[in-house]
Amino acid sequence: MSWKKALTIGTLLTGATAVGIHLLNKAIYLSAVAEHLLKPSAETYYDWKFGKVYYTKRGEGAPLLLIHDLNTYSSGYEWHALTEKLAKKRTIYTLDLIGCGRSEKPNLTYTNYLYVQLINDFIKNVVKDSCDVVATGDSCPLVLGACQSGESSIKSISMINPEDIHKVAHIPTYRSRILTKLILLPLAGTLLYNILMRKENIETALKGAFFDKNKISQSLVQTYYETAHCGNASSKYLFSSICGNYLTANVMLYLKDLSNSIYIITGCDEKKQNDAEEYKKVLPSVEIFHLEESGYYPHLETPDALLEQLSICLDL
């Protein structure tokens, strides 16, 4: 076989493979969003400098901002079982962090400081008043950073199962940077993201987060699956930054500078309870509460118990 013929065959095979991967990625996307479970009830967006940020506003009274966990399958939907109840006593804001849910997902490096700016700008330009904040998991350091920045109008902070204070300080390594570059590849990277964010993996993650696995409905799994693929897998840009440890934060430094009322609410997981104690070692004024028969997402699993605890922390 001549080199010209071999080159032609190689080019055709490469092109066919690329087309096949593209069609597969497209099919996964269309399948994931077919039910439109995350369709916004109203087109309410904050036109931020790095992209449009979807948010909701309900109720009347002193403002309370709810911030979901920082993951590509997370969104403001996380709070759906609590917002109407909280709105009876407060003005409730929820938002989809940029890179998540119904917000835009620009191709950029997502960092802790990026989200610190977003939270402060959202409070300044949308809430337009000092407010209490409730955050989940990996979003907790973002709120602490926003509060410590000196530009914030945050009053109290309630953190639900915050991440290990030492883990969030991990910095990018050679291996994590390589993984980031792989995920950012146009076709193969998108396919890798789609494989990692397939429905079975999301369901497994939810099962690990719930105390009572029977409370995980297929509707919840499908909504989280759809969330991970909104925008034709452009959530992979945030995912690549998470995998690359680009959202590192010095939580110990944040805590030492804060005088706000800070509450930590955990479920019955012993590891998360120990994580909460690490925060208290740095800032003794932190108050810790534990919910029985609840896991990582008490607002999804035991919303009434969480509401009762928040009512005490926030004097609702």
Image (cartoon, rainbow, N blue to C red):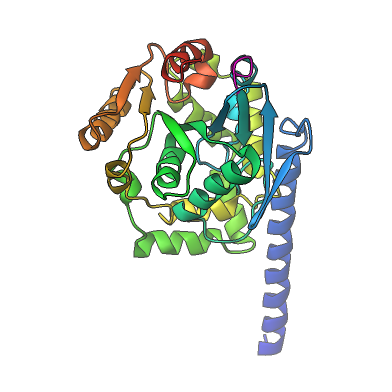
User: Can residue 224 be seen in this snapshot?
Assistant: no
Q: Please check the rendered image and state whether residue 17 is part of the magenta-colored stretch, yes or no.
A: no
In this orientation, which residue lies closer to the viewer: 41 or 280?
A: 280
User: Can residue 17 be seen in this snapshot?
Assistant: yes
45 up-or-down from 244: above or below: above
Q: Which residues are magenta?
A: 86-90
Q: Residue at x 48, y 33 (%)?
A: 135
Judged from this view, the residue extending furthest toward the left is 281
Q: Residue at x 45, y 46 (%)?
A: 146
Q: Residue at x 57, y 46 (%)?
A: 195
240 up-or-down from 298: above or below: below
Image mark count: 0
The x and y percentages for residue 3 are: 66, 88
Q: Is residue 247 left or right of residue 186?
A: left
Task: Choose top left, top right, bottom left or bottom right for residue 224.
Answer: top right
The x and y percentages for residue 55 are: 67, 37
Judged from this view, the residue extending furthest toward the front is 129
The x and y percentages for residue 85 are: 61, 14
The x and y percentages for residue 262 are: 36, 30
Task: Choose top left, top right, bottom left or bottom right for residue 312.
Answer: top left
| Quarter in which the N terminus is drawn | bottom right
Q: Is residue 164 left or right of residue 34?
A: left
For the stretch drawn in magenta, what is the main secondary structure?
A: loop
